[in-house]
Every structure is written in C-alpha cells, then in structure tokens.
Amino acid sequence: MAAVRRGVQGTRRLKLQVFRIIVFVAAGLFFLVPIGAMVEFSTRGVGDQPRTLAAWQSIGTYPDLVAAITASLELAAITTIAMLVLLVPTMVWVRLKLPRLNPIIEFICLLPLTIPAIVLVVGLFPIYNWMGTNFSDSILTLSIAYVVLVLPYAYRSLEAGLASIDVKTLTEAARSLGAGWFTVMWRIIVPNISSAILNSAFLSVALVLGEYTIANNLLYNNLQVEIAMLGRANAGVSIAVAVASLLFAFVVLVLLSFFNRGRGRLQLVELQQVMRTERG
Amino acid sequence: MPERSGVEVRLENLQRRYGAVVALDDLSLTIAPGELVALLGPSGCGKTTALRLLAGLEDADGGRVVIGGEDVTGLPANRRNIGMVFQAYSLFPHMVAWENVAFGLQMRGVGLAERKKRAIDVLELVGLSRFANRYASQMSGGQQQRVALARALAISPQVLLLDEPLSALDAKVRARLRDEIRRVQLDIGITTLFVTHDQEEALAIADRVGVMQSGKIEQLGPPTEIYSRPASPFVAEFVGLTNRIPGEVKFGAVEVRGTQLPMVQKDVPSGPAVALVRPEAITITSNGDMSSGPLVGTVIAVAFLGATSRVTVDLGDITVLAQLATSAATDHPAGSKVKLALRPDPVLVDSHN
C-alpha cells in the first residue's frame, strides 16, 4: 500500500517537474525570441556581407545618442532620489501622525495611473513653457514630470514595505532611546524597508528609461526619443541601443532578485533557529 | 550594569482629549523614588495615555510632568531619559540583540567597545547574554521582551515605563517574566510605571496600584488595600470577583439575606442597596436548618482552580460564587444542597443600582 502511494506521489512530482520546465521554456522563448531577433537584426551585414558588430560599435559615435543616454540616466537617478526623498518621509509621517490622511495620499499617488501620458502632457505643456522661459530649459527638468509619473508604482511598493513593519512602535522605541527624527528615518525605517525602496527605485529607473510620450511631446530628446529618431536614419544602431537598454533593465532586475533571494534564505535560517530554540 | 537611579515622578493635573473623548481628566499621580506603580483599568480608561504623556510620545492639553524635580512637559521623547518597554514587539529587526541594547548608548555618544560591553552586561542582567548575536526573528516572544527590557535599562534611565509588556505572551512565560521584571526593578531601584489591564499582574508586581476609569484614578493604594478595601463599586468589581447581593441598609449596617454585615462606606442612606461580597467571604456551613432559608441553595457547578475551588450556588432568586479550599469543595458536588454563611467582613455597598 505504502509502495503504491510512493509510486503515485513520484509520478505526480515528475509531472509537476515537466510542467515547470515547459512553462519555463515557453516564458523564456516569449521573452528571448524578440530580443534574439533584435540582436540578429542589429548584427546583420549589408547585402551579402557577414555579420558585424558595426551597429553596436557605432553607438558611441552618435553624440546626440550619447547625450540622450547620459540625460536619461541622470533623469533616472534624479527622479528616483527625488521620489524617495519626497515619498518615504511623507508616508512615514502620515502613518505616524495623520493616519486619517492615508486614503487621500493614496488617492493622490495613484491618480497619475488613471491619466494617460498624452493628457498629462497637455497639462504639463504650459508649465514647461513657463519654466523654459523663466527657470531652465534643461532636459533634467523632466524629472519633475517623471516624479509624478512614477508615484503610483513607487507608492504601492513602499506601502507594502511599510505595512510589513510596525512603524509606530519602532519609531517610538527609537525616540524613547534618544533618537531624533532623522536618525529614526535613516537608522530604523530605511534599513527595514530596504527591499521596498530598491523595488520602487528599480521601477522608477525602468519607467524613466522607457519613457517616450512626455519627452517627445515636450520636445526633449531622451533615450527613447533618440532611439526613435535614430531608427529613421540607422535602424541597426537604433535596435542595438534598444537591446542594450533592455539588457540594462534586465541586469538591474536580476541583481534585485538575487538581493531578495538572499533575504529569503536568511529568513528561512532564522525560522529554523527559532523552531530549534522552542523545541529545546 | 545600569546605575541605581530612582527619582520622584509627578503627574500634575494632566488633561488629554481626543476630539470629544476625554482620555485624561485632571489626572494627578506621584510615584516615589524606586517605587513601582501599576495603572490598572479597562480598555479606554486612559492608562496608556498617561504613560505616553510621561514618555513624551504625546502632548498634554493641560497639566505638568515632573521627573526628579524637573518640569519635562515640553521636552520631546528623545530628550527625557526614559526607558520604555512596549506591548508590541519593538526590537529593531535589522539589528542583533546587543546592537538593539546598545542603540540608546550610541545615541548618547558612547564608543563602540564600551557600548558593546555595557550591552552584554545588561543582557546578562536579564539572562540573555548568550543570545547577544541573535536577531529578533531568531528569538521567542518572551526573549524579545527581555531584550527590550535590557534595551530600556541600558541607557540608565531615570524612569522605566512598561506598557503592557506581557500581554502578547503565553501564561507561563508571562508569570516568569513578570517576576523577572520585578527582580530587576528592585535590583536597580528604578522608579517604574507599569500599565496593564491584567489585575493579577498589577497586584502581583506593584508597590501601589492605581485603578483607573474614565481618565481618572478611582483608587490608588497597596494591592492588599485595593483588593480588600475597594473604594468604589467599580474598583470592587474590576479587581477580583464580586457577588452583587441585594440587601437593605439600616442602623449603619447592611442586612443581606438575614445576615448583618458592616459597611466600608459611612453615611449610606437607609434603604435598599446591593452589597458587594467577595467569593472568599462566603463559606459553606453544615449548621442549622438545611431544608429552607435565605442562604440555602443548590450547587450548580464546581470549578477546580488548584488549591481552591469556585463553587456556584443557586439561591433561587440569585446565583452566588463561593471560593473554598478544594478539600472543602469536594464535599459539595454539583446538585447537592448547601447552606451558605457570610463572613462579617466590611463590605462595599452600591446604593445607586
């Protein structure tokens, strides 16, 4: 009887394993085939000539493209930092002192999600027009619009992080031990929501690097706008840059998943230790 | 080791409102140096608010907080030199036990080597030095609260505040940690305010107990006095079990089912009233007529509590509880007819029922 049960369980496990492999291969193909096709296209030689990395090598020879890449990376950094500086203390403060405002903050933060980017541009255009005349017409001013754009994603991620800890008790414990508000934020809250901060930072970076509509309509040349323009002049370089930016986002995602996996393992070890302690 | 640091703490006419709700209504309390006072009361009575105002975690609408002769009413929490243990587990999850304990010392500018040494010393005081390198998630609830106690004591605070620190623990751990808190408090001689809704905890640990209701202290006194001479029907009913037995006040005493009992209160007007009688003031007697009488009834349940048992007796119109030695209670199983006797202890009378 036991042998039959073991046999049934073994078959079930094997079926599950096969199913997992099929799903993994299908998902891999879904993502990798388009990227592979892009790589294939970007390394195609002219006419009958063999494959070449000329398109990839020439990325650096387009000054506008290099400037756009630099600007997009700067925008990603400024947007991410501004978003974190704005959102983390606000969310913590609202949780501690004004919990009744939480639904309002949530509504405001999620609002950009419901407004199409093109509609946002209509509202932003006169502001940027005024800023260009009176303040600065630098592409980096786009970060103001991008902070608004990334709010919904960053808010959700940070909210999940803050919900996983007892912000009020930890803050009060730190305060009673002599910590000022800055120390509470920097030494107590931030280390305990580091995963959420990383997640929201990654989402912001990915969103800014992939943003086209606002930049194009406000007449700024960021990475995506430049890729689109380059696509008309040199499709091979345009596709090479698109693949490179995809790979960059992919590397960031992999790094993040490794970081989270490390934390997961640590939590498992902690759980095992507690169980051993309680048995002892 | 933390230094002996008992100071006097005075809460003077503290007031706190949350909208229309009065959380503290002119509350005054003086805690002597090295004394442990427990504030006891039901949820919403204002006991935690009083503690939070003392800690500086909330601002008072009126009144003063004086610690060691210094008015600290306007000082923020991080400048009050108060150690606090919270109801919820409050260890910093990203720090190991010794780092948690050393955090307050770091805030006071103590160097790394010195604060690590002092943290281990204080962990030794609560018997947890071997857990110094464990994270909160690697410790049980009881261990976490002991580390939290060590963390609160490590900064050598002037006052120790305990906000229901045992309520999340199971009964056995709770009793052990309760005794440990008392031992450490006596060792250090630190002035302590302990807030709880658990009467057993308050009576067991405190030098004095303050029973609170509606933002006020109804009665403040040693545990024995609170239990045996409650100042009001609320205190009598909140602390321990009480039988409410109808009777009549006449000639300065209350007559309850044919028995004259002295009264705690003076100046109770003659007339119908309810006497509040403790279960241990009721005994079962074998004398006299067992067939009828105001105190003859039928046992309907016997609850075994260890050395004592609680016997529920149906007297026809009311049901009363009697607490007897278990050896005596076993003679009266459920269904048996018994006659009760009331010990002539002074009883509290509720004439407003």
Image (cartoon, rainbow, N blue to C red):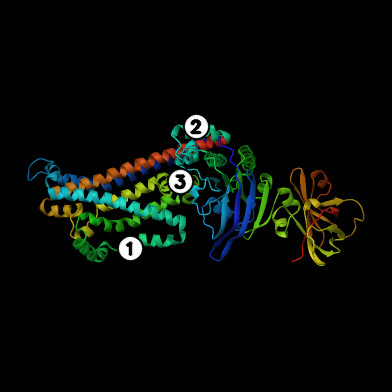
Percent position of residue A15, x then y: 40, 42
Q: Quadrant of residue A153?
A: bottom left
Between the C-alphas of marks 2 and 3, the distance is 21 Å
Instruction: Write down the quadrant of residue A148 in the picture.
Output: bottom left
Q: Chain of mark 2?
A: B
* Residue A5 shows up from this direction: no
Labels 2 and 1 touching (C-beta < 8 A): no
Q: Which residue is mark 2?
A: B117
Q: Return the x and y of residue B29 as percentages of the image width and height.
A: 63, 53
Name the residue type under label 2: Lys
Which residue does the numbered mark 1 point to in the structure image?
A114
Mark 2 element type: helix
Q: CA distance from mark 2 to mark 1?
A: 56 Å
For label 3, the residue is A179
Q: What amino acid is labelled 3 in the image? A: Ala
Q: Residue at x 33, y 60 (%)?
A: A113
Q: Chain of mark 3?
A: A
